[in-house]
Image: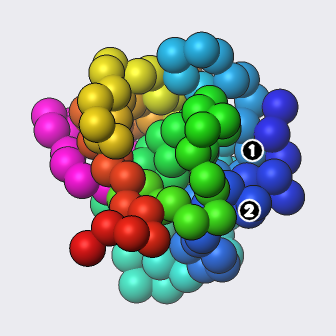
Amino acid sequence: MIDIHEILSFLPHRYPFILVDRVLELKESGLVGLKNVTINEPFFTGHFPEQPVMPGVMIIEALAQAAGIFILKSDPTINKESSMFLLAGIDNARFKRIVLPGDQLYLHIDLIRKKQGIYKFKCEAIVDGEIACTAELMNARRGQNDT
């Protein structure tokens, strides 16, 4: 298990944009992360005040952050102080269930392939055993010597 303190050592994100609370399982080919969705999330004040729903783009971002944690945790050759992985592509995103305050969003990340600093993942966000979102995401390395 990876707690929030270790997650913060891998990701440059900070409140209010850190969207992974814990890593529950780290495998050779992926991980399972957790986002506890609370009514205190800043995006709920405008999306939507009367019926708060987690925006789909925030679910995608949570999946991308989980993928970034996997990359930095699984590859010891990467210098995490000078490298950053950015979301480089989203394919086949589908939203199948709304995510509400009080939900626990399980972030399933499975590596499809990696090549020349670009990683492609099959991702699922799951709430109460139901798929909320599926997507294929690409994360690309941006180091201090990149332009």
Q: Nearer the viewer, residue 65 or 125?
A: 65
Q: Amino acid at mark 2?
A: Leu
Q: Position of residue 36 (x, y in %)?
A: 68, 51
Disc on res. 8? 2
**The N terminus lies in quadrant:** top right
* Residue 81 quadrant: bottom right
Badge 1 density bin: few <14, some 14–19, many ≥20, Cα 10 Å: many
Closer to the camera: disc 1 or disc 2?
A: 2
Q: Position of residue 22 (x, y in %)?
A: 75, 44
* Residue furthest to the left: 92
Q: Is residue 92 left or right of residue 137?
A: left
Q: Amino acid at mark 1?
A: Arg
* Residue furthest to the front: 145
* Residue extent of the magenta highlight: 87-99
Q: Position of residue 64 (x, y in %)?
A: 42, 49
**The C terminus lies in quadrant:** bottom left
Give SS at disc 1. Answer: strand
Residue 45's place in the image compared with 22, above or below, is below
**Measured Cα–Cα span from mark 1 to mark 2:** 10 Å
Disc on res. 22? 1
Q: Earlier in the sequence, mark 1 or mark 2?
A: 2
Badge 2 density bin: few <14, some 14–19, many ≥20, Cα 10 Å: some
* 9 magenta-colored: no
Image point (63%, 56%), residue name: 80
- Does the magenta stretch mainly form a helix, a strand or a loop? strand
Image point (44%, 21%), residue name: 110
Image point (37%, 61%), residue name: 142
* 92 magenta-colored: yes
* Residue 30 quadrant: top right
Q: Is residue 103 visible?
A: no
Image point (74%, 62%), residue name: 8
